[in-house]
Amino acid sequence: MSENRFKIVFDGALLPGVDITTAKLNLAALYKSEVAAVERLFSGQAITLKRDLSQTDAQTYLQALTKTGIDARIETEPSIELNLADAHEHIPPRAPLTTDPESPYAPPRAAVGEALPTFAPLKPFSFEGRIGRLRFLAWTMALTLVTLAIGSVFAIFGLALISTDSTAGLILGGLLAFILVVALAFVSIQFSVQRLHDIGWSGWLWLLNLVPFVGSFFPFVIMVVPGNATANRYGAPPPPNSAAVKVLSSLWIVFIAIVVIGALAGGITAIQEEYESAAETSYESGSVITDEVEVEPAAEAEEAPNSADDAAEEAQPPVDSAKE
């Protein structure tokens, strides 16, 4: 008589205190599959996850499944006995059994769901999907370049309208500029939401940008934190970065260098102008003091004769009492 064989059966039940989303993620990680591929396992029907196992292999396989949070069980497979008396009967062909892998933790070869692509498609103008750090920087740089180009055209158009003194044209230009700013801000929010999805965070966390103090450094958190290497609740990971993505993302280094050099040049120019203005003011103050000093002796000279005359008038000649 041959050794008894066992199989692992699962009907969608979970262990106490385990969330179904966590169980799906753990099970997908165990099978090295997508999250959507294990959805059929939670339909409520009994599904055989592994068959034709020895008792030791079945216990090992069950322990691995228990760590994911699902409540699977071991069942005995019916033994097959051959009898020469039944040799003339037609036995329907059985489905070919795949050879057991060397490791009991290897994913099953039977399809448990529809085949999904390894990488999710890109959706630039959507709140769904995922993008990595380099692609987020590349898309943001492309949006910045488009903004600068359209802004330059609008600036030239606005100067032309100002020279013609057209009130209607100015109102129309202001309305178009407002619509453009709103559209570009909306697209920028979509990029940030997809970056948050890649990390595994909710897109609603973008509202932290509106919080004082927190919003000053939260964009840097989005650019620094790496995304999930495998599928998460927002879908499969994004495709690998192309050469265009790497070039566009590296342009941020050039852009930041230009901004820093411009700021330093502007600061040096402002300091130089301030120094020249202070020197000119000091020179003018010195000229005013010199003029006042030159004027004072002249004023004293004018006052001196007057003082002598006054003294002469006050000094009367002596009176001869004999003559009187």
Image (spheres, rainbow, N blue to C red):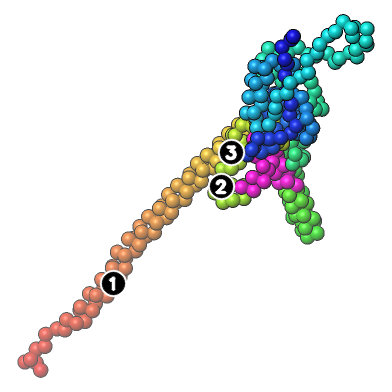
Residue receiving disc 1: 303
User: Considering only vertical position in the picture, is 138 above or below 94?
Assistant: below
How many marks on residues? 3
In-image side of 97 versus 269 (left or right): right
Query: Which mark is on residue 319?
Result: none
Residue 318 visible from this viewpoint: yes
Name the front one of labels 1 and 2: 2
> What is the spatial separation of the Cα atoms under label 1 and label 2, in whole angstroms?
74 Å
Q: Position of residue 218 (x, y in %)?
A: 59, 42
Residue beneath the point at 90% across and 12% down: 91
- Dominant SS in magenta: helix
Along the line of sight, the residue nearer the viewer: 140 or 73: 73
Residue beneath the point at 73% across and 23% down: 75
Query: Which mark is on residue 221?
Result: 3
Along the line of sight, the residue nearer the viewer: 177 or 48: 48
Query: Which mark is on residue 214?
Result: 2
Residue beneath the point at 81% across and 11% down: 81
**What residue range appears in magenta?**
183-208
